[in-house]
Image (cartoon, rainbow, N blue to C red):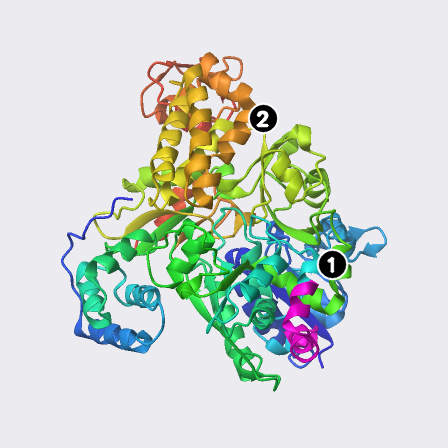
Amino acid sequence: MGKKTSTIPFNGTPEQEAKLREIISAHKADKGALMPVLQQAQEVYGYLPIEVQEIIAKEMDIPLEKIYGVVTFYSQFSLNPKGKYTISVCLGTACYVKGSGDIFNKISEVLGIKGGETTPDGKFSLVDCRCIGACGLAPVMTVNDDVYGRLTVDEIAGILEKYQD
Amino acid sequence: MYRSHVLVCGGTGCTSSGSQHIIEALNTEIEKNGLKDEVQVVKTGCFGLCALGPIMIIYPEGTFYSMVKPDDIPEIVSEHLLKGRIVSRLVYKETVTDDGIKSLNDTNFYKKQHRVALRNCGVINPENIEEYIGTGGYEALGKVLTEMTPEQVIQTILDSGLRGRGGGGFPTGLKWKLARNIVPDADQKYVCCNADEGDPGAFMDRSVLEGDPHVVLEAMAIAGYAIGASQGYIYVRAEYPIAVKRLEIAIRQAREYGLLGKDIFGTGFDFDIGLRLGAGAFVCGEETALMTSIEGNRGEPRPRPPFPAEKGLFQKPTILNNVETYANVPQIILNGPEWFASMGTEKSKGTKVFALGGKINNTGLVEVPMGTTLRTVIEEIGGGIPNGKKFKAAQTGGPSGGCIPAEHYDIEIDYDNLIAIGSMMGSGGLIVMDEDNCMVDIAKFFLEFTVDESCGKCTPCRIGTKRLYELLDKITKGNGTLEDIDKIERLCYYIKENSLCGLGQTAPNPVLSTLRYFRDEYIAHVVDKKCPAGVCRSLLQYYIDPDKCRGCTLCARQCPANAISGTVKNPHVIDTAKCIKCGACMEKCKFGAISKK
């Protein structure tokens, strides 16, 4: 998994930082609090740039390299900001045998980005995911919170058009 | 008191197909028709028949409406709920007979099922603890705390023959016994629940958590009493937001009712449960990796021994059981071990939940007694394979398991039978494949998954799976040799024998089992340079049938590589040297003249 440090400048606001500090102090006493803190920090910032990891390291008194190690281990944590819409195509077995690989390739072709990338205008990110558990609707993809099931390749362009705002 | 109850599935499958809109529409219409005090809408967990979602059942009649749309709701409310006339065009077809509407339990999908773990799913409102208590919930915890010693609890679980439903099939009672006895003077012990259901295509644990979260809490408290632990953790996938939310609600309600926390039932027994969310790492379903992750680290496995029963979470004695395993526990306590052991086969007792997926009509969740044949599950309960295609294989156990070919269609499914034919129970994902699926491609698919999910701690898994993937990729691209097949086999055994944890030790299984049953398909790829199922793109050739082609030129205009030539109203031809095999021509052809082989 190639994860690089973000090249996009960090734009954290003081409100976000205050929120982050609040989260940290709420969890400080818990055993093994790092994961919940990182998860909530990602909710606040949308991703986990090195600047945020540094604050967490300092406040929780955990070495930065350990935090970076944890962040890069789990696929849910992102070092880069995500697009306005995250398209995630299920490549779990049930969807795969029903052709979700073709769906993924089609989106990648239409948007001109690969899995894990974001379009240059910051609108779409494309990711593959492992089974969201809606196997009855296979093949399935989600665009933020909207779920699209029983997909065919032909429908892709129409679906993406809905998100042109 | 309400005269009618409308149960709408609020599981992930039905929520994804829009059940929330159904509930909103129902409430609006019920209000409009003045039925608010007579009809109650209940959002339940999964009914199991996910393929037909959104699903809705109206009681007391038990009418089963499937694939409901918000536009149908005004009619259902005014006809069925107001006037008592069933809207038969919206009812699940199989329940409509000449003599009227038959009960859901008599349909093929449900009649061979036996629901123990899924007992309450689709029956109660999972966000209301009183509904769980109303169906006998927390009685088992009461019985355990007031009438039984911890040793008796463990003996009961041992006698029932319950084995771990998460994959390995280790006897649950034995696990508890070890955790109770191995470090008798431990100051702290932990009870953990593995809800990191990572096997793609398996979703039974999610359904239990969404449909009946309290059963897990109750069972964990029982386990806590049995081994002498006062703290539990549930490690649940963050990809399951509905399950997480319902667990949070359930834990809060259980605390309010004094069923979690201090001095439960006034017996002096303390037990509380914390929730920990995974962050998308398959390896965290492995027990030691899961514990490492709860501790706030990279979720890498640890060598065993020491086993978690001795040194587990935070170095304290710990048990870890899977969601479905826990879902059986309260029923075993209430109905006795003999009742549980009366179901199933000699060494696999009770029932097992399977998530049916892939090329099968009734995708969804089914629970059957152990020992039910694969044929029964697929043909009778699952409704067979769509489009008249032929059954080729069923894949069980996900990336750790193997496939069951047609020659074993009548196998009685239990732990030991599956191992004997080179597959495994796993968590219960059952993916059906038909003649259009290429087994080499499937093996490659699973390897791609393990390469991606290997944590990288040990070399055999980190590098071995990568090399294995490359060899499979070479074969699917038409560059493989017979020698590569031998290399694959040698590498498989090397990875199995030398990897640190279950992920690596089982990663070669999908390859070994497809090689065992579908070696001819591998050979076809390697020697004939053909993919018999027509999946592996590099080995395909697109072809236009001159008899069917009308010369409409649509394909030629679609082709991004200008590989199609021909004039108007005359048959076109594909230049296979130029063809990039994108399939765009076949997609567009209105006359079905283009095929691949």
Task: Kindly identify which residue carries mark 2.
Answer: B517
Quarter of the image for residue A60 reads bottom left
The mark found on residue B560 in the picture is none
**B594 to B6, vertically: above or below:** above
Question: Is the stretch drawn in magenta largely helix, strand or loop?
Answer: helix
Residue B155 screen position, x and y as percent: 68, 64
Of the numbered discs 2 and 1, the one sitting upstream in the chain is: 1
Task: Kindly identify which residue carries mark 1.
Answer: B340
Q: Nearer the viewer, residue B185 or B451?
A: B185
Callout 1: chain = B
SS at mark 1?
helix
Span colored in magenta: B132-156
How far is disc 2 from disc 1 in space, using C-alphas?
35 Å
Query: Residue visible at 55% across and 31% down?
Result: B513
User: Which residue in the rendered view is the most extreme toward the right?
Assistant: B99
Query: Residue visible at 53% across and 69% down?
Result: B184
